[in-house]
């Protein structure tokens, strides 16, 4: 009997924490293109705040949303057989990014050369892209 009361109490506490969290985040599960777009915007905002600080208090939120996006992308988006520059172009379009928005990964001129097919993506830049978009590095190599 006591265990059941504890379980009910815990589930109520989870619910009381979850609903405000869900309201602030705006999306906690990704089922539709709208959910996906909202999650991507939130992920981008969190990446700007967190940067490379894996110990940041919001890192768990970022990881949670990234996992939700990954499940959606695995089911709805196929980019496995694309050229690395096409993958980059696709991701830039999906995230509403311009070349200058990727200056944290490479200079705009280098991004331009990559997109034009004049330069391959280096391992260093591929790693940066993979971290930024939360996808496997091999899609850029």
Image: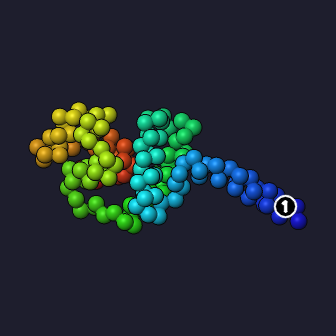
In the rendered structure, the answer to whether residue 96 lies left or right of residue 61 reads: left
Residue 42 locus on image (x, y percent):
46, 46
Query: What residue is pinned by disc 1?
Result: 5
Q: Residue at x 65, y 53 (%)?
A: 19
Can residue 67 be seen at all in this image of the molecule? yes
Residue 78 locus on image (x, y percent):
31, 64
Q: Badge 1: few (under 14), some or many (20 or more) residues near its Cα, within 10 Å?
A: few
- Total number of numbered labels? 1
Would you place residue 10 above or below residue 115 in this image? below
**Most extreme residue toward the left, as rendered?**
118
Can residue 138 be seen at all in this image of the molecule? no
Q: Which residue is drawn at 37% across and 44% down?
A: 131
Q: Which residue is drawn at 80% across and 56% down?
A: 9
**Which coloring applies here?**
rainbow
Q: Residue at x 34, y 49 (%)?
A: 95
Residue 1 locus on image (x, y percent):
88, 65
Would you place residue 104 above or below residue 135 in this image? above
Viewer-proximal residue among 16 and 55: 16
Viewer-proximal residue among 120 and 58: 58
In the rendered structure, the answer to whether residue 64 lies left or right of residue 107 reads: right
In the rendered structure, the answer to whether residue 139 lies left or right of residue 118 reads: right
Would you place residue 47 above or below residue 14 in this image? above
In the rendered structure, the answer to whether residue 77 lies left or right of residue 11 reads: left
Residue 51 locus on image (x, y percent):
44, 35
Q: In the structure shown, which secondary structural element does the residue marked by tag 1 occupy? A: helix
């Amino acid at each position: 009997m006591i265990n059941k009361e504890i379980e009910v109490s815990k589930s109520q506490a989870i619910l009381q924490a979850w609903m405000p969290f869900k309201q602030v985040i705006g999306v906690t599960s990704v089922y539709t293109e709208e959910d996906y777009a909202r999650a991507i915007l939130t992920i981008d905002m969190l990446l700007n705040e967190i940067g490379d600080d894996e110990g940041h208090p919001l890192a768990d939120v970022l990881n949670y949303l990234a996992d939700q996006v990954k499940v959606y992308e695995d089911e709805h988006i196929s980019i496995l057989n694309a050229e690395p520059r096409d993958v980059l172009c696709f991701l830039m379009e999906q995230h509403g990014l311009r070349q200058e928005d990727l200056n944290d990964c490479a200079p705009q001129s280098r991004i331009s050369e990559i997109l034009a097919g004049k330069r391959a993506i280096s391992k260093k830049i591929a790693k940066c892209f993979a971290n930024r978009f939360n996808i496997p590095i091999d899609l850029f190599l």
